[in-house]
Image (cartoon, rainbow, N blue to C red):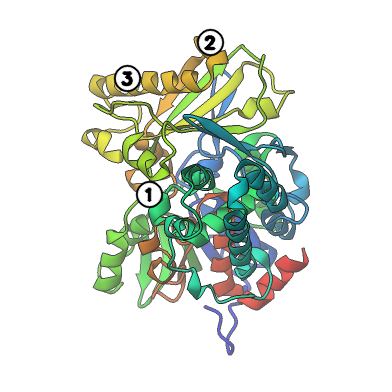
Amino acid sequence: MVSSSERFLPARGLEPDAFDVVIVGSGMAGLCSALVLAKEGFKVCVLEQHYRPGGCLHRFFRKGVPFETGFHYLGGVGPDGTLARYLRYLGVYERMSYQPLDPDGFDELRFPEYSFRVPNGWPRLVERLVDAFPSERAAIHRYAEVCQEICRSSPAYSFQAPTMDLGDYSQVSLGAFLRGLTSNRRLLAVLCGQSMLYGTPPEVTPLEVHALVIDSMLQGASGIRGGGDALAKVLVEAIRAHGGVVRIRSGVKALEMDGAKVTGARLEKGELVRGRFFISNAHPKLTLGLLPEGVLRPAYVHRVESLREGISCIGGFFTTEDRSVPRLHNIYSMPTDDVDAVYRDAVFGQGKDGQKAVFVSFPSDREPEQKGPRVVLALGLLAYEEVERFADSRTGKRGEEYAAFKDAQGQALQATVERALPDLAGKLKRVEVSTPLTHRDYTAAPRGSIYGVSHALDQWGKYSLQARTRIPNLLLTGQNVLLPGVVGATVSAFVTCGFVLGFDSLFQKVARA
């Protein structure tokens, strides 16, 4: 770690199989960490167990048709956006083509008796909320003011000196905060309606998490031409252009130590990749499993192992030839305006009666030049317990019982989507269905959690896992140690790299980008 008296600097004359920094995992945070350090002159190596880099950024193909696994849209890429600043510093911002969603309503929130379209920017959002709920003007303005103040007071997000002490809000839930402003049930539902962006019910969502995630989307929600693959590709190319190495099919089975420090990553095939410093973009629980037993304090091990995982989902991947109603927005369709109840009752699974909540996205509508059928993607909540009895199986080898379960849930998901999109009823072809086990096997996420550990109030702030570990040359990064999503993973990478490079120096460079 960097101290005032000692800097971690690139070494000279390292042998071919030795690196300044070895990074385990090539998710967004792993790739960003590698590129930051490669730009600063370090010899870096990224080790990825999958056959393509990017983690949840990567796509899969069926008959040449691309489907996103975890990248649906992102925020903060407008000219002054948070993510834009980071990507400009990394030198990749101009190398991608952004596909803005409808600025007048990039997300449509649907409830049984009303709907609301979320526009870009706080001023427009406030205006639309006031138009819809004129008697709630004071509550709406207070909500917007506090959320923006939280964002301005988060230096790694705003690149500004804090303007307030976040202590007043660091242990306040979104639900409690909003109930202190209004009792209007519909307004509460609208303000909480995008909760699947971070995956926790309002009653346990830290207000800070909500503010930062929603603000990033209001900065300009967008897709990327070529999807998440395009983002992973430019990051990998930039790492290699700076002399870094990105290796696929290089799963790590152990981190070997000499004394108090990690000295090498032992690959599943037996090879040892040596390094001076190590960053793990793997889930913290998996990182513990890579270390020799007894090197970390039992209390820390227990703390990591006790972390609750976040939500898991069923994913539906559909195509249709119907292009009559193009949609440059996403749809959050919920059968109740009690968003907390959505996480409890409106979920998929055996014996789950009633209508379900679903998120629907239309990636091919943003890329009109893309040939082939129109793609429709859908996500619904599905507890890991629903598939836990198949936990010892692997993708493609789960047996007939699992296939029947997945087919039944796929049918239920498709029916939910067609109720939300009556113009496409009977016109959707179900190409693939994913479950929490799919996500677990491809991303090594315990219990198939799409956002890693739960970003709930009792695992946030002073209760959250930090990037720094007690092993002096091992850091953690990724959405498990900060915020979920592309923006959250990116910010996490820079915070992690701040321990190596020095925070002031690094963030001043980003602020000037």
Q: Please indicate, yes or no, whether residue 38 appears anywhere in the rendered image.
A: yes
The crowd level at tag 1 (other Cα within 10 Å; few <14, some 14-19, many 20+) is many
User: From the viewer's perspective, is 125 left or right of 25?
Assistant: right
Separation (CA) of disc 3 from disc 2: 18 Å
Q: Position of residue 91 (x, y in %)?
A: 74, 55
Marking on residue 310: 1
Q: CA distance from mark 2 to mark 1?
A: 33 Å
Q: Residue at x 68, y 52 (%)?
A: 122
Other-residue count near label 3 (Cα within 10 Å), few / some / many at <14 / 14–19 / ≥20? some
Instruction: Name which residue type carries label 2.
Output: Lys
Q: Which residue is mark 2?
A: 427
Query: Residue 219 versus residue 409: which sits nearer the camera?
Result: 219
Q: Where is residue 89 shown, x and y percent of the image?
A: 73, 60
Disc 2 crowd, CA 10 A, few/some/many (<14, 14-19, 20+): some
- The disc, 2 or 1, on the residue closer to the chain's N-terminal end is 1
Alpha carbon distance from label 3 to label 1: 24 Å
Picture layout, residue 504 above or below residue 176: below
Which residue matches tag 3?
408
Where is residue 507 shown, x and y percent of the image? 67, 70
In terms of secondary structure, where does tag 2 sit?
Answer: loop
Q: How many marks?
A: 3
Relative to 226, does residue 510 appear above or below in the rendering? below
Mark 1 lies on a secondary structure that is loop
Tag 2 and tag 1, C-beta contact below 8 Å: no
| Horizontal side of residue 436 vs 166, given as left or right | left
